Amino acid sequence: EAQVTQNPRYLITVTGKKLTVTCSQNMNHEYMSWYRQDPGLGLRQIYYSMNVEVTDKGDVPEGYKVSRKEKRNFPLILESPSPNQTSLYFCASSLRWGVYNEQFFGPGTRLTVL
Amino acid sequence: QKEVEQNSGPLSVPEGAIASLNCTYSDRGSQSFFWYRQYSGKSPELIMSIYSNGDKEDGRFTAQLNKASQYVSLLIRDSQPSDSATYLCAGVGGGFKTIFGAGTRLFVKA
């Protein structure tokens, strides 16, 4: 089944404890992206990747890191999480970057930072 | 800051009625637009995409785009309770980014 998977689905952690949220897609997609969703603010793009080893900042990159060493994986790293990073996170992918390409979303990761 | 604006709602319509969802955008370079539906606690899923001025129909859904007015809309005919969800409008243009609106909550009353 074609899909985007994320792990963990739920995470409660404490301020300053490094964490990684994994994202994997099995559709051979070139473009991958991370979003956070907060009430009233919609989806905001954190980072995106055009292909392996090519990443760039979205609109809200502060406090996050990403890497794209393999085409299928695009982990999101929070080196020192803070309470303002409590949010619902979505990974998404599309075949390639282009104005005609829809994005497919993972199931989401609900993160709480205490 | 490039923006996509939506009325947060909630928009409440009776079953069988037409639901009209609207979206405006600030970036004149936006070339295509997508409507995603998101049920509570779930991930967004694509409903419609539109790239050219005019209307695009797919079943009960019609997307409308007016680039001169920087306006996008989604019409849902014969609304069903299962259509109750948040609808996200997204614009795609230059810069390799997708800009999402905050979403409109739709309630369809049985």
Image (cartoon, rainbow, N blue to C red):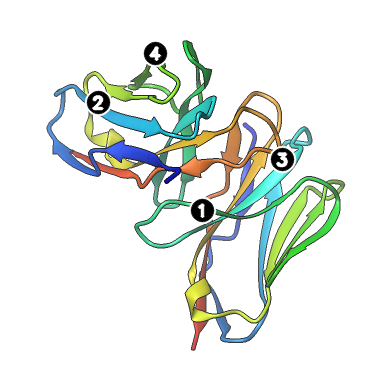
Residue occupied by mark 2 = A20
Q: Is residue B61 above or below residue A53?
A: below
Q: Are marks 3 and 2 in contact (CB under 8 Å)?
A: no
Judge the density around disc 4: few (<14), some (14-19), many (≥20) Cα neighbours within 10 Å. Answer: few
x and y, in percent, of residue B8 in the image: 53, 61
Q: Is residue A61 above or below residue B25?
A: above
Task: Give the chain letter at badge 1.
Answer: B
- Mark 1–mark 4 Cα distance, whole angstroms, equals 27 Å
Judge the density around disc 3: few (<14), some (14-19), many (≥20) Cα neighbours within 10 Å. Answer: some
Count of residue discs? 4
The amino acid type found where label 1 is placed reads: Glu
Q: Secondary structure at mark 4?
A: loop
Q: Quadrant of residue B92?
A: top right
Residue occupied by mark 4 = A69
Residue at 52% in and 72% down:
B83
Judge the density around disc 1: few (<14), some (14-19), many (≥20) Cα neighbours within 10 Å. Answer: some
Residue occupied by mark 1 = B45
Residue occupied by mark 3 = B26
Residue at 64% in and 34% down:
B2
Q: Are marks 3 and 1 in contact (CB under 8 Å)?
A: no
Q: Nearer the viewer, mark 1 or mark 4?
A: 4
Dot placed on the residue nearer the N-terminal end, 3 or 1: 3
Task: Give the chain letter at badge 4.
Answer: A
- State left or right for residue B95 relative to residue A27: right
The amino acid type found where label 2 is placed reads: Thr
